[in-house]
Amino acid sequence: MRDIIYSDEYWEHYNNCDARTQEKFDYLTEIIISVKVIPKRVATKLTNSKFYELRVSTANEHRTMLFAVDHLSLNEATKVVFLNSFVKKATKDYKKQVKKAEKILSEMIKEM
């Protein structure tokens, strides 16, 4: 249903995660690919941003992946770009990670 494009930064984070966390990423990725209407518990739009986040909870840590879509609504998107992932330690992490996601997206667009 949806095509996923992965950035190098996403794979770097993913490969540094333990097997259980990778399984959770894989499970939620499969939902993004195959489910038409994505539940809010899986992915939500970041306030004042063009990005969505996918939350993966493991050992009381929240690993958050930011991604952009080819439509204003994730539910209508046919392509999803997994930009970057990080371990959420504080709310202020979001501003830094959104800027990083914007940079990654910009570089990916230039390469296309």
Image (cartoon, rainbow, N blue to C red):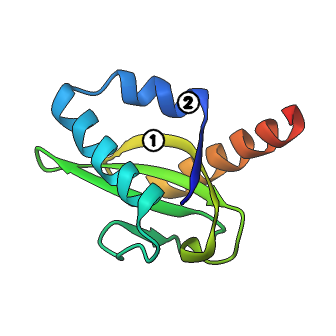
Q: Are marks 2 and 1 in contact (CB under 8 Å)?
A: yes
The residue at which mark 1 appears reads as 85
> Can you give x and y, in whole percent of width and height, for residue 85 in the image?
45, 41
Q: Earlier in the sequence, mark 2 or mark 1?
A: 2
Neighbours of disc 1 within 10 Å: few (<14), some (14-19), many (20+): many
The one nearer the camera, 33 or 100, is: 33
| Residue 17 numbered mark, or none | none
Tag 1's secondary structure? Answer: strand
Neighbours of disc 2 within 10 Å: few (<14), some (14-19), many (20+): some
**Quarter of the rendering containing residue 42:** bottom left
Q: Is residue 28 above or below residue 83?
A: below
**Quarter of the rendering containing residue 86:** top left
The one nearer the camera, 27 or 103, is: 27
> Can you give x and y, in whole percent of width and height, for residue 28 in the image?
33, 53
| Residue 9 numbered mark, or none | 2
Q: Identify the residue at horizontal 52%, vertical 53% (top origin).
A: 66
> Can you give x and y, in whole percent of width and height, for residue 6 in the image?
58, 37
Q: Disc 2 marks which amino acid?
A: Glu
